[in-house]
Image (cartoon, rainbow, N blue to C red):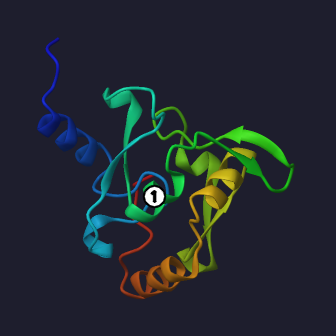
């Protein structure tokens, strides 16, 4: 199979993620911010299995990290990998969909490292929830 162009790769990443962050589930059409194509493992190359869609907040907070500390167990764990793990296994919505809780060590460490519940995003999510635009249906 021939290598995909970056344009085709990008299109496939956006399509697969339904234009929503694969970490915090924020959707591009709701937040109005351009999503980033993120390397799950910074050293893992540009293959589709190492790329995901991330909102600017998650991408910039994750940076090059692949591990973080679960504050409950104080154990270093791998961050959530949207190519290998299911979102609903590691995260759940609370506060009427405005906040994300980690259900596992990986989920908790990812929520903390990616700052998924910082006040500015929680405030925005509350507005999106009232508008019926969040959380995205069937996106996880």
| Residue drawn at the location 51% of the way across and 32% of the way down | 84
Tag count? 1
Label 1, on which residue? Answer: 60
Q: Where is residue 50 drawn, in percent x and y? A: 40, 31
**x%, y% of residue 105?**
75, 47
In what quadrant of the picture does the N terminus appear? top left
Judge from the rendering whether residue 102 lies leftward or rightward of residue 43; answer left or right.
right
User: Is residue 99 shown above or below 56?
Assistant: below
Give percent across and percent down for residue 115: 59, 65
Q: Vertically, is 19 above or below 94?
A: above
Q: Residues within 10 Å of mark 1 (few under 14, many from 20)?
A: some
Q: Quadrant of residue 55?
A: bottom left
Residue depicted at x 62% and y 56%: 113
110 on left or right of 103 = left
**Which residue extends farthest top?**
1
Q: Nearer the viewer, residue 119 or 138?
A: 119
Q: Nearer the viewer, residue 75 or 42?
A: 42
- Judge by depth and name the residue closer to the eye, 135 or 19: 19
Which residue is most to the right? 73
Q: Position of residue 68 (x, y in %)?
A: 69, 46
Asked whether, in this view, residue 6 is left or right of residue 133, the answer is left
> Where is 94 relative to 8, above or below?
below
Residue under the point 55% across and 37% down: 85
Q: Is residue 140 left or right of residue 36?
A: right
Q: Quadrant of residue 31?
A: bottom left
Query: Helix, strand, or loop for circle 1?
Result: helix
The structure residue drawn at horizontal position 25% and vertical position 70%, both measured from the top left corner, is 29
């Amino acid at each position: 199979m021939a290598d995909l162009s970056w344009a085709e790769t990008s299109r496939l990443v956006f399509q697969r993620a339904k234009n929503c962050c694969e970490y915090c589930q924020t959707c591009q059409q709701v937040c109005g911010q351009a999503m980033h194509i993120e390397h799950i493992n910074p050293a893992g190359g540009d293959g589709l299995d190492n790329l995901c869609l991330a909102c600017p907040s998650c991408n910039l907070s994750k940076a090059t990290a692949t591990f973080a500390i679960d504050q409950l167990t104080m154990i270093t764990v791998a961050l959530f990998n949207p190519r290998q793990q299911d979102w609903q296994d590691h995260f759940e919505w609370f506060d009427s969909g405005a906040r994300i809780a980690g259900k596992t060590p990986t989920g908790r460490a990812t929520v903390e490292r990616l700052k998924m519940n910082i006040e500015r995003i929680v405030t925005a999510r509350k507005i999106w929830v009232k508008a019926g635009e969040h959380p995205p249906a069937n996106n996880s």
